[in-house]
Image (cartoon, rainbow, N blue to C red):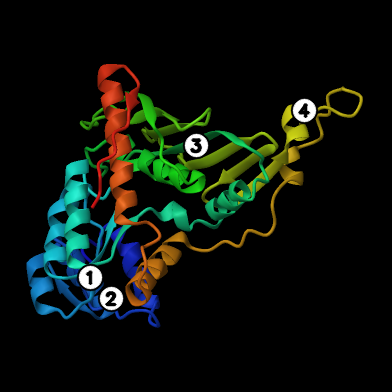
Amino acid sequence: MIGVGGWGKNHLRVYSRLKQLCTLKALCDIDENRARHYGEMYKIAWYTNVAALLEKEEIDAVNICTPPLTHHPLALEAIRAGKHLLVEKPMAPTAPQAIEIYRAAKNKGLQLMVGFIERFNSGVLKVKSLIDSRDLGEVRYVSTSRIAPWTPEVDSLGVMMDTAIHDVDAVRFILGQDPVKVYAETSNQVEGYKGRETSAEILLRFQGDLSAYLVAEWLRPTGKVTRKIRHLQVTGSEGVAILSYIPQLVWKINAIDVLSPFVNEKGKPNYSRDPMEDNLIKPVVWKEPLEMELRSFLQSITEGGEPAASGKDGVRAVEIIESAARAVETGKPQTIIYRTLR
């Protein structure tokens, strides 16, 4: 493990209990006190220097959970050392850097996975199955909301690259295709934040009439508890699927309910009826997405095959966010140009 701060300590916790799939050997963090603390907690070697870890430890794979601006140099260092790699999202701050990581891993014959955790959310997998089986009919529209408190520790890449990228990947995943155009508008609503943006609205256009509308925002905590909001909705010709990411709950509402959810058979208002309660899909078994993600990474090493969230997926997501940023700068929709990956 490289980086065991905020999110990295959760990776560390999960690896420590996947004893049938791997042996947790060592960790590295630039904060010596933190590195020592977790090294002693898990009874493993600890370092403050990545080169020393890669040189001294006999390891097969590396997991990078450091700030995004460090992903590119650290990933290349791990790949040069011949290590399979899982790198948190975004894979790199820019598409050229992400492509360099992708090609370096491919040239070395190493597995490269990106930390798109929502692909391993049981609710997301259920929504994808509803789309693939055409239970919703022809998909016409997808919308997402991802809202969370802002903290000073958040890096300067902005809410699109840090947060909305999760939903960019989730939409690509459930639809099985890449958007062709993007338009976006952003703003900075958090006093004291020096990054690119804290609020973003992103409109993705796919082939045909299919579109997706993504909202991502950081809120300044007001002293009261500010909870995270993570929702996804898919509208099709035969019905709607609604997902609440965190509890992994999925509702499927048929077309007739979509048209008149609160009207009785006489056309009068029916205030007592909540279609959400009636249409909850049961059971969707809750599983920790991070554990499913790390299991998948380890299995890709031992069993081969492309990782479930591949280096290509990492590149594509960064390309889409960069195109959204160009749309903000120009005030015009952008055709997304995807680089050839060899």
* Residue 293, image x, y percentages: 41, 63
**73 w.r.t. 231: above or below:** below
Q: Nearer the viewer, mark 1 or mark 4?
A: 4
Q: Which residue type carries mark 4? A: Ser
**Front-most of residues 342 and 31:** 342
**232 w.r.t. 307: above or below:** above
- Evaluate whether residue 193 shows in this view: yes
* Residue 120, image x, y percentages: 47, 58
Q: Which residue is mark 4?
A: 260
Q: Which residue type carries mark 3? A: Thr
Distance Cα–Cα, label 1 vs label 4? 57 Å
Q: Which residue type carries mark 1? A: His
Q: Which residue is mark 3?
A: 144
- Residue shown at the point (17%, 66%) measured from the top left: 108
Name the residue furthest right. Answer: 266
Distance Cα–Cα, label 2 vs label 1? 6 Å
Q: Which mark is residue 56?
A: none
**53 w.r.t. 112: above or below:** below
Distance Cα–Cα, label 2 vs label 4? 56 Å
Q: Which residue is mark 1?
A: 37
Image quarter hosting the N terminus = bottom left
Distance Cα–Cα, label 4 vs label 3? 23 Å
Q: Residues within 10 Å of mark 1 (few under 14, many from 20)?
A: few
Looking at the image, is mark 2 or mark 4 earlier in the sequence? 2
